Amino acid sequence: MSRVYSYLRFSAAKQADGASTARQTEYAKKWADENNLVLDESLNMRDEGLSAYHQKHIQTGQLGVFLEAINTGKIPTGSVLIVEGLDRLSRAEPILAQAQLAQIVNAGITVVTASDGKQYNRETLKANPMDLVYSLLVMIRAHEESETKSKRVSDALLRAARAWQAGKRVPVGDIAQAVGINVRSVQAIRAQLRQDGFSDLGNTLQVDEAVETDSEGGDHD
C-alpha cells in the first residue's frame, strides 16, 4: 500500500522550532487524508544540523536511509515524500541534486513541496516539462547560496588561521558573523565549524571568549 512520508531537515538545530515542525506535520497529515493514504511515521525522517550542501544528510543522515530503503524496495511504489522545498533534499551541484530527485521520481515516488504544493512525479513532469526546468532553477539557486556562504566562511577562517599563526588571538565574533550564527560560547562556534566541514580549523583556532552576535538568519545549507 502506498504511503506518505514527511522529511524535515534543518542545517542548524536553532531552525528546528516547534512551529515549523508542527506546520509540516499538519500539512503531511492533511495531504494523506485528502488523498486516502496513510502517513507513515515509522521511519525517523528528520535530519538536524546536517548540511545538504556537503551531502551530510545523505552520507550519515535519515535521507540517506530513505534513499537506501527505496533501492531495496522497502518504500512502496506510488508513495509520497513531502518536504518543505526542494532545497531540503539537496543543495549540492545542480546536476547531482537533479539526479537525486530523479532517483526518487524514477522509483515511482511523488515528491510534494509543502511551500507551494507542487508535485513531482513521472506523470506530472511528462505533462508539464517546465516543472523540470523550474526544479533545476531552484536547485541552481540553492547551490549558489550555499556556495557563497561556504566561500565566505572559508575566507574568514583563512584570515583567522593566518592571524593565529602570527600569534594573535582571533575574535570569536568575527568567526561567528562569517558562519552566520548567534553564539554565546566557543563550543558553539566549534560545533558550527564542524558541521560546515571545517572541523580541523575549529579544533585548532585559539579564540577569545564568545560574545553574542547577530545572526544573518535563513538556511543556506
Image (cartoon, helix red, strand yellow):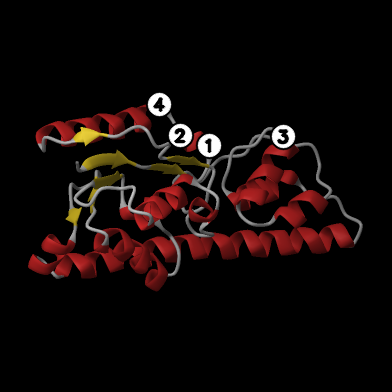
**Outermost residue toward the bottom?**
95
**Label 1 to label 2: alpha-carbon separation:** 5 Å
Q: Residue 185 carries which label?
A: 3
Measure the alpha-carbon separation of dots 1 and 3.
15 Å
Instruction: Looking at the image, tell me whether mark 3 or mark 2 is earlier in sequence order.
Output: 2
Circle 1: residue type: Ala
Q: Distance between the residues labelled 2 and 4?
A: 7 Å
Give left or right: position of 148 versus 179: left
Secondary structure of the residue carrying numbered label 4: helix
Q: Are marks 3 and 4 in contact (CB under 8 Å)?
A: no
Q: What element carries label 2?
A: loop
Q: Quadrant of residue 21?
A: top left
Q: What residue type is labelled 4?
A: Gly
Q: Which of marks 3 and 4 is nearer the N terminus?
A: 4
Q: Nearer the viewer, mark 3 or mark 2?
A: 2
Of residue 98 and residue 153, the one placed in the foreground of this image is 98
Residue name at image x 30 percent, y 31 percent: 25
x and y, in percent, of residue 209 in the image:
79, 36
Label 3 secondary element: loop
Answer with the quarter of the image where residue 101 lies.
Answer: bottom left
Q: Do the residues labelled 1 and 2 touch (CB within 8 Å)?
A: yes
Secondary structure type for disc 1: helix
Q: According to the image, label 4 marks what residue?
A: 18
**Dot 3 amino acid type:** Ser
Q: Nearer the viewer, residue 168 or 116?
A: 116
Q: Rounded to the nearest whole Å, what is the CA distance between mark 4 and mark 1?
A: 11 Å
Q: Residue at x 30, y 58 (%)?
A: 104
Camera sees residue 170: no
Q: Which of marks 1 and 3 is in front?
A: 1
The disc placed on residue 16 is 2
Q: Return the residue at label 1.
A: 13
Please tell me the numbered disc located at residue 179: none
